[in-house]
Amino acid sequence: MMGQGALPGLSYVIGHHSLEPLPPPHPLENKIVAQEAKIERLAGDNHRLTSTHAELREALVAATQDAQKLKSHIRSTQTESDIQFRVLMDKIAKMEVNIKTDDSVKKDLRQANNIVKEGVVDLQFRTESNVKKEKVV
């Protein structure tokens, strides 16, 4: 057995197998062990954060592409809606013209009908007058 030297407990570490227990670890050794554990934990956290960051970047790219597709689709739909709206407005304008034309035609037909009725009444009156004249003669 080595004697107690300047560094007690070192003999166990160097290779002397003593049944004597090691003295309690030095506070500096405890601090180093704690820092190593903290470094390992931080390295694991950093790895997880790096992975999450990459996944979030990919999700952002995908979401941006989806948003661009949706904007394009909305513009396309708006354009189609505008075209359909213009077509409907043209149809409505044509129908209004037809209605006005129909109203005008109806008015003209009523006037013609009234003229014909007046003519028929006048013809009947003349016919009756001629018949009376013939009877008188």
Image (cartoon, grey):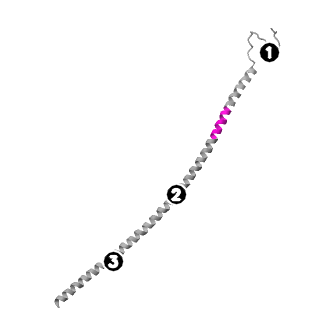
26 above or below 129?
above
Q: Residue at x 72, y 25 (%)?
A: 36
Q: Residue at x 21, y 84 (%)?
A: 128
The amino acid beneath tag 3 is Ala
Q: Secondary structure at mark 1?
A: helix
Tell me the CA gap for discs 1 and 3: 133 Å
> How far across and how far down the image is residue 25, in percent?
74, 17
In space, the residues marked 3 and 2 are separated at their CA atoms by: 47 Å
Q: Residue flagged by tag 2: what amino acid is it?
A: Glu
Viewer-side residue, 27 vs 2: 2
At numbered mark 3, what does the secondary structure look like: helix, strand or loop? Answer: helix
Q: Reading the chain from its start, which is encountered first: label 1 or label 3?
A: 1
Residue 50 lies in the magenta-colored region: yes
Q: Residues within 10 Å of mark 3 (few under 14, many from 20)?
A: few
Q: Is mark 3 in CB contact (under 8 Å) with mark 2?
A: no
The numbered dot on residue 2 is none
Q: How many marks?
A: 3
Q: Secondary structure at mark 2?
A: helix
Q: Is residue 117 left or right of residue 102?
A: left
The residue that label 1 is drawn on is 14
Q: Provide the major secondary structure of the magenta segment.
A: helix
What's the distance in space between the residues labelled 2 and 1, CA to CA? 87 Å
**Given this view, does label 3 or label 2 mark the residue nearer the observer?**
2
Residue at 60% over, 47% down: 65
Q: Extreme left residue here?
A: 136
Q: Which residue is mark 3?
A: 112
Instruction: Locate the N terminus by quadrant.
Output: top right
In the image, the segment drawn in magenta is 45-56
